[in-house]
Each structure stands twice: as C-alpha cells, then as structure tokens.
Image: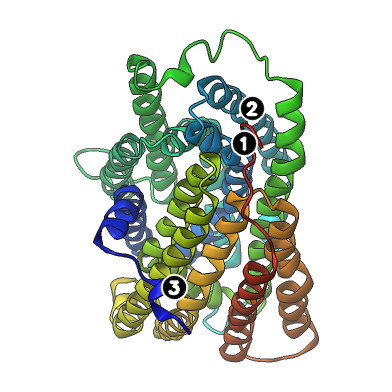
Amino acid sequence: MNVRKYFGDWKFYRMVLTIAVPIMIQNGITNFVSLLDNVMVGQLGTEAMSAVSIVNNLIFVFYLLIFGAISSAGIFTAQYHGYKDINGVRYTFRFKFIIIMIASLAALAAFGLAGDGLISLFLHESESGSDLELTMSYARNYLEIMLIGLVPYAISQAYASTLRETGKTILPMIGSICAVVTNFVLNYVLIFGRFGAPVMGVEGAAVATVTSRFIELAILVIWTHANKAKCPFIKGAYRSAYIPAALTKEIVIKGLPLLFNELMWSAGVTITTQCYSTRGLDVVAALNISTTINNVFNVIYLALGSAIAIVVGNLLGAAKLDEARDTDRKMIAFSVMCSLVMGVLLASFSGLIPLMYNTTDEVRGLATYMMIVLACVMPFGAYAHGAYFTLRSGGRVMITLLFDSVYMWAVVIPVAFILSRATSISILWLYPICHGLEILKAVFGAVILRKCNWVKQLVGNR
C-alpha cells in the first residue's frame, strides 16, 4: 500500500487551507458564539434550554432544506466558474433564488400551522420532574419570533454559497462574523435585560438571532452589488427569471435529488432526536449541550467537506480529472487526521464544559457521556462527510441520495425507532448504538468511492 498517495506537499495544503480556513473561521466563530448563546439560555434553567433546543431541532430541517436547494445548483456553479462561464454562474444563482423562496414559504406555512404539534412530540416526563407546560410555552414563543428570520437566512445562503463557489470565501466569513457578534451582544442584552433593556428570556434570544440574520443579509447583498466587477454574475441577475430550459432540466435531474436528500436527512436527524427524547426532558437538555459543543469541535472536517466540493468541483469543470481524483483522496485523508485530533480534545474537555450550565447533575453527566460517544465516532463522520461531497461534486446525486438519506431512513431511523419504542433500553445504550452506525456508513462510503466512477465533467465540452 502506497501511503504517500494520501499526503500532499506544502503547496497542496496551502491551496486547501486557502479555501477551507475562511470557512473554518466563519463556522468556528458561528458555532463558538452559538455555544456562548447556548450557555446564556442555559442560565434560564432546564425548561428554557430544552425549549430552545426543540425549536432549533425543527428549524434545522429548514436550514438543511435550504442547503440542499442551493447545493442543487451549486454543483453547476462551481463547475461553470472553473469553465469561466459567467452566464452559467448567473443562471445557477437565479435558480437558487427561486427555489429558496419557494422553500421558505413552504416552511413558514408548515411551522405556522403545525408548530405546537411538532413541539409536543419532544415533550416527555423525566425523573427530575421538569415542567412540560412551561417548556411548551417557551418553545411556542421562541418559534413565533424565529419564523421572521427564515427568509433573510435563505437569501443570505444563496449569496454566500455563490460567492464561495466562485472563490470569494472572505466576504461570507465577514458577514457571518458580524452576524454572530450581533447575535451574541443582543443575546446578552435582551436575555438578561442589560443596559436598561427589558428581561426577555428565550424571546430575547430569538430577537437577537433574527436581527443577526438581517445584518448578514445586508452585508452580503450590499457588497456583492457594489462590487459587480468582482462578482460579474450579479450583473442583470434580477432583470428576468430566465434560466435556459436545458440547464434547468440538468439541475433538476442532478440537483433536486440533493434537495430531497438534505430534507430527508435533516428530517431523519430530527426524528432520531425525537426517539432519544422519549427517555425524558433531561435527555433533550443533555443533547442540546453535547450537540452544541460537538459543533464547535467538528468545524474543521465540516469546512474541509465544503472545500472538497469547491476544489474538486473546479478541477472537474476544468477537465483536470486525474488531478481531481488525487486531490480528493488527499483532502479526505487530511480531514480524517484533523478529526482524530479534535476528537481527542472533545473527549478531554467533556467533563468540564457542562459545568457552565445551570442544570441538574443528571443532565451534566448525560452530556459528558454523549460528548465522549461523539468524540469516538468523529473520524468516521469526517470520512463519510468527505465521501458525500466527493460524490456531489461529480454529480452522482442518486448515489449520494442512497449513501446519505436512504441510509438514514433504512438503517438509523428503524434502529432508533424500534429500540426507543419496543424496548426499555437506557439512553446510555440507545445513544451509542445509533451513533455507532456512523462507522458502518464510513465503510459504505469507502466502498462506493472505490467502485463508483464519480469523476465527471458536467459543463463545457464533454
């Protein structure tokens, strides 16, 4: 076995990090400030923390729906940019805008009509005797305000994704940093009523988040339209809704399965979380802590996954097929190595971090246990994440669908559902069993990458 083929030289890593580091910084700051926000809400008690966690789990489905919507066209955006076709980039931007607006309106209708029913699915008694009615009240108020931020969030993602796919990763990072700083400051002011502001609790957290969405949108839109020479795709982008029929057909065939995949995968994560919640509200609170912390530690491999889509997509668009294959292999190996380090760090600090929360010892102990489980499976998650973006960059969307959401619904959800409903198994076994399935997924991904010819040029002369 030639181990060297998994490692690049300094020039290679410098190229990768040039793309990935701004995304890491953006996501890192976002997740770190989310952690601080989470700790602030955690000072309000288990009920408030659980309410915010439940609503965020539901809105997570919308976030992934938007990600899938822009990814469906983003495959072509990256390759058109590599092929130096500005009109192609402009058409894909239009497609993104149209589809994210449809998705946003659908989400507003769904949450507006069925919000209470969805929240109630996560409310189960726990040994600590948490107040379920109070949790429902908090969650309802939080959701009503958060709905205002859905549309600006969606539009921001259309701009940010197109900028990243055309090599401009700095501005989305700046916009995100400004948004999270705004969110953090307003959280401190509005949750606790500082500087003469009223004490708003969880409603203050929602107002802060929504305000930050509008700030990020303003930064992205104003800069993009003020720098048309650097962003030529925006010239005339809104003059019409025209998208060539042939391109629309290709995006629908290649891309909409990605939208469906993200929708089904995120819904699957939410359903799995609901299965965990049957073990009581303490589990919901512990999940909130462990997931928030895990998001801070897995920022490197998530950013490298996005970098794979950009770098490999550009190489495929430029018809550098052998280089794309070699680059992808090295980037995935780099991602797994980074995640090994981050997993060790997560496990090392797992016992200290929950002490920041105003909750019970039972919740803190569960959160620590869950973080150790997440640390153990992180390298496998990194490999699976890299495999997903590899398949996506080559347009192998049906295999991507099979690998991601079909695996979730055919394997993970049945296991979680059966164990949570048909047995009395403790969360101490239920949680690691379900997350341990990430190992099987990584093995599945390795087989697919070896057997599947994902190296495809989708644009230009083929």
Q: Nearer the viewer, residue 151 or 383?
A: 383
Mark-to-mark CA distance, 1 and 2: 7 Å
Residue at 63% x, 10% y: name it: 240
Q: Amino acid at mark 2?
A: Phe
Circles 1 and 2: CB atoms closer than 8 Å: yes
How was the colour assigned to the protein in this rendering?
rainbow
Note whether 358 is above or below 65 in the view shown: below
- Crowding near the residue tagged with mark 2, few <14, some 14–19, many ≥20 C-alpha atoms within 10 Å: many
Q: Amino acid at mark 3?
A: Ser
Mark-to-mark CA distance, 2 and 3: 36 Å
Note whether 106 is above or below 345 in the view shown: above
Chain-order first, disc 2 or disc 3: 2
Residue indicated by mark 3: 290
Quadrant of residue 75 within the rendered picture = top right
Residue indicated by mark 2: 95
Residue indicated by mark 1: 73
